[in-house]
Image: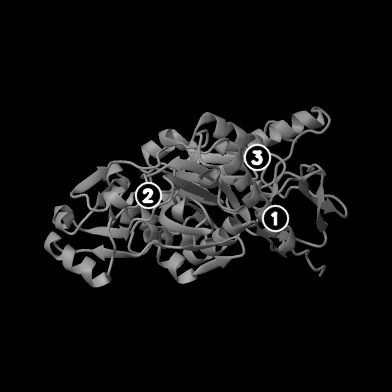
Amino acid sequence: MRTEGEAIAVCSRASEVEWNVGFKKAGLGHFYTYSVSERSREQQQHYLQDRILQEESKLDWKRLSHESTSCDRINRQDDLWVLEDREALTLESDGCAVSERIPLSPSFIMASSSKLKVGYALTAKKTQSFMQPALLALARSKGITLSAIDRNRPLEEQGPFDVILHKLTTETWHQQLKAYKLRDPNVLILDPPEAIKKVFDRQSMLQEVAALNFRHSRGKVGVPKQIVVDSDSASISRMVAKAGLKFPLVAKPKFIDGTANSHALSLAFNEVCLSELKPPLVLQEFINHGGVLFKVYIIGHIIKVARRFSLPDVCANEVNRTGVIPFPRVSCAAASADGADLDPNVKELPPMEMLESLSKELRSRLGLSLFNLDMIREGGKGSRFYVIDINYFPGYGKVPEYERVFTDFLVSLAERKHKFSISNFREPVPS
C-alpha cells in the first residue's frame, strides 16, 4: 500500500467513455487516492486540491477507459464527479484499493480548485491597470484562475486554458493563437484577432453600426457622416466638398495603434485649414451633444455606462472660426461628468433597454465580447444617438466596481462551461 502523500495514477483495462468538459473535450488518465482513515474529509479535500494544482499542468488529457466488470456508472456526489463501483476498483500496478470518491479531471471539479482557467496576454500598461490584486483575489474566490501567459515561451507549451484573454496586435501573436486554437478547438479566445482588427481601423469600426440602422422604441442610433482620407493633404478639401460634409469637422487618426496619439482629435472649422491635417485620417461631421459623452462599457452580456465631459458645443457664431484646434485626449477618466451639476436632459443616461438591444446586435455583428461604445445624444437631449467610436478592451479599470463586474462575466463563462459538461455527458452503455 502506498502512503497517503503519493498521488497514484490509475488508468487501466477499458472500453470508452466520452464527454465534453465545458469548452474542452477531455478524458482522464489520472486518478488520485488517499487514506480515508487518517484524514478528515476537509483535510482530504484540501490535500487533493493541492495535489491537483501541482499536477494539473502535467495532466495528459486522455480518454477515460471503462469496463463493465469494474464500474457501473459515473455519478456526481458533493460536487465531485466519482466512479461508482459494482465490486471494487483496484490498481493494475499494485492492487491498492482506491477510495470510493475518485475525482475526475480538474475541469470536472466545478466546486473546488478552479471553475475556469484564464490565460491573459496584455500589454504591460494594460496588465498594470487591469490585473489589480482585488480582481485576482475576487476571481480566485469564485474558483477562477487568472494566469499571465509568458510571451517569451511558445503559447502551445502553456496551459491548458479554458479561456485566452488578450489584447496584442502582432502577427506573430495572432499566428500563435491560431495554432493553439487548432490544437484545442474548444478554447475560448477573447476575442478573435480578425474581429479585433475591425475596430482598430476607424474606416471599418462603424460600418456595422451604420448597416444596422438601429431603431428602438426608446431611441434611434446611427453614426455621423464621415469620410476616410488615405492620400495627401492637398486632396482633403476636394473630398470633403464631394461628400458634402458640413463644418466643423472632427479629425481622427485612421488607425488605433495603442498610443495616445491614436486618440488625439482635432476640430477643423473651415476648408482653408484642411491642408494642415495629416492623413491617413477620418473626418466626421461634428454634432452638438451638450458637451457630454457616454462611455457604454460592454462585458459580454453586462453593460455599464459612465458620463464623460466631451468637446463643447459649437455655437452658430463660432462656425466661421479658422484653423484647427487640437484636443490631445477627450473623455478620459479624469473628465468624468458623473458628479457634475448638469442640465437634467444632458445628464440623463441612454435608456438601458435600448443599450441592451443594441449591444446584443453589435456583439453578434462584430464578433466581440469586450468593447465599449463612445455615444453622444444629438443636441444633448432627445432620443437621437450617435456612436462616434468603438474601443476594444477599453479601460475597464475606470469603471466603478469593475472587479465585481468582470468577475461576474467570468463566472458566467464558468457556468456555461458547467452546463456544457452536464448536457454533453454520456453514460456508458453496458456491454
Decide: marks 3, 1 in contact (CB < 8 A)?
Answer: no
Percent across and percent down for residue 240 are 23, 66
Report, in whole angstroms, how far the alpha carbon at label 2 lies from the one at label 1.
43 Å
Placement of the N terminus among the 4 image quadrants: top right
Q: Residue furthest right?
A: 87
Q: Secondary structure at mark 1?
A: loop
**Residue 12 disc label:** 1
Q: Residue at x 60, y 57 (%)?
A: 356
Residue 144 falls in image quadrant:
top right
Q: Is there any visible trace of residue 24 in the rendered image?
A: no
Residue at point 72% right, 61% down? 14
From the image, which quarter does the C terminus lie in?
Answer: bottom right
Mark before the other along the chain sequence, 2 or 3: 3
Closer to us: mark 3 or mark 1?
A: 3
From the viewer's perspective, tell me whether residue 353 is left or right of residue 17. Answer: left
Q: Quadrant of residue 96?
A: top right
**Of marks 3 and 1, which one's residue comes earlier in the chain?**
1
Helix, strand or loop status at disc 3 = loop
- In the picture of the structure, the residue carrying the numbered disc 3 is 143
For mark 2, give the secondary structure: loop
Q: Amino acid at mark 1?
A: Ser
Q: Amino acid at mark 3?
A: Gly
Q: CA distance from mark 3 to mark 1?
A: 31 Å
Query: Which of pointers 2 and 1 lies earlier in the amino acid sequence?
Result: 1
Quadrant of residue 12 within the rendered picture: bottom right
Callout 3 crowding tier (Cα within 10 Å): few <14, some 14–19, many ≥20 = many
Find disc 2 in the rendering and name its residue: 168
Residue 323 horizontal/vertical position (percent): 18, 49
Pick whichever, 76 or 222, lies toward us.
222
